[in-house]
Image (cartoon, grey):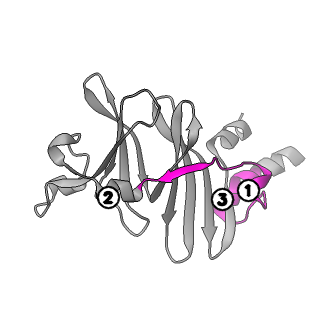
C-alpha cells in the first residue's frame, strides 16, 4: 500500500506543482555542457535550397530572405554532419529548432525543440541536447534529450515556476513506475 501511494504521488507531482524529490541532485546529475549552439545557428545563414524541404516556416512566408539560420555539425563523431535548423516557429519560449540526419541521400528529421539549445556530453554515441525554454511569467523548463532508437527523445525535464523548483519525472522513471 505504501509503495502504491508513493507511485501515485510521484506521478501526480508534476501536475500538482509540488516535487516528490526536493533536490534534483538526489536522483540525477545533469551531463556536462559542451557549448551553446544558439549563436552559431543564427549567425550561419543557409539558403532554403540547401535545406530539407519545408525545414523552416520562413520558406512559406511571402516576405522571407531565402535563408535561415542553420548549423552543419557532427553530433555523433562519424564524420558526417547532422543539421540543426532554426525552423522559424519560435516564440516567447525561445527559438524553434529541427535536427536532421542524412540517410540514404535524403534528410531525416530526428528531433524538434523550442528554447535555448546547448550540446552536452555524449550518450549512445551522440551529443545530448539540453533545451531551456521560457513559459509565462516566471516559468522555465529545462529538458535533456538523448538519441534513442533513431530520434532525440526527452529523458529528463525539470520545471521552475516563480523561483520554485518543480521536478518532473523522466520517461525512464515513468516507465519503471508503470511496470
Residue mark closest to the camera, 2 vs 1 = 2
Pinpoint residue 53: horizontal percent, then vertical percent. 20, 41
Quick check: marks 1 and 3 in contact, CB under 8 Å? no
Q: Is residue 166 left or right of residue 141?
A: right
Regarding mark 1 in the picture, which secondary structure is present there? helix
Task: State the residue at coordinates (38%, 61%).
Answer: 95
Residue annotated with mark 2: 42
Q: Is residue 158 magenta?
A: no
In the image, the segment drawn in magenta is 8-37
- Quarter placement of the N terminus: top right
Q: Which mark is residue 24?
A: 1
Near-viewer residue (178 or 26): 26
Q: Eyeballing the image, is 156 above or below 179?
A: below
Quick check: marks 2 and 3 in contact, CB under 8 Å? no
Residue 9 seen in this snapshot: no
Regarding mark 2 in the picture, which secondary structure is present there? helix
- Quarter placement of the C terminus: top right
Residue annotated with mark 3: 14
Amino acid at each position: 500500500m505504501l509503495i502504491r501511494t508513493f507511485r501515485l504521488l510521484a506521478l501526480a507531482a508534476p501536475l500538482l506543482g509540488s516535487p516528490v524529490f526536493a533536490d534534483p541532485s538526489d536522483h540525477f546529475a545533469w551531463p556536462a555542457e559542451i557549448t551553446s549552439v544558439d549563436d552559431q545557428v543564427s549567425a550561419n545563414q543557409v539558403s532554403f535550397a540547401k535545406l530539407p524541404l519545408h525545414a523552416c516556416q520562413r520558406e512559406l512566408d511571402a516576405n522571407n530572405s531565402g535563408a535561415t539560420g542553420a548549423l552543419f555539425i557532427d553530433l555523433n563523431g562519424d564524420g558526417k554532419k547532422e543539421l540543426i535548423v532554426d525552423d522559424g516557429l519560435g516564440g516567447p519560449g525561445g527559438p524553434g529548432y529541427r535536427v536532421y540526419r542524412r540517410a540514404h541521400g535524403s534528410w531525416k528529421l530526428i528531433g524538434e525543440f523550442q528554447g535555448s539549445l546547448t550540446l552536452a556530453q555524449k550518450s549512445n554515441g551522440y551529443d545530448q541536447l539540453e533545451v531551456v525554454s521560457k513559459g509565462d511569467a516566471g516559468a522555465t523548463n529545462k529538458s535533456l534529450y538523448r538519441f534513442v532508437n533513431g530520434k532525440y527523445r526527452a529523458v529528463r525535464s525539470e520545471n521552475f515556476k516563480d523561483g520554485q523548483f518543480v521536478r518532473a519525472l523522466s520517461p525512464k522513471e515513468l516507465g519503471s513506475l508503470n511496470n
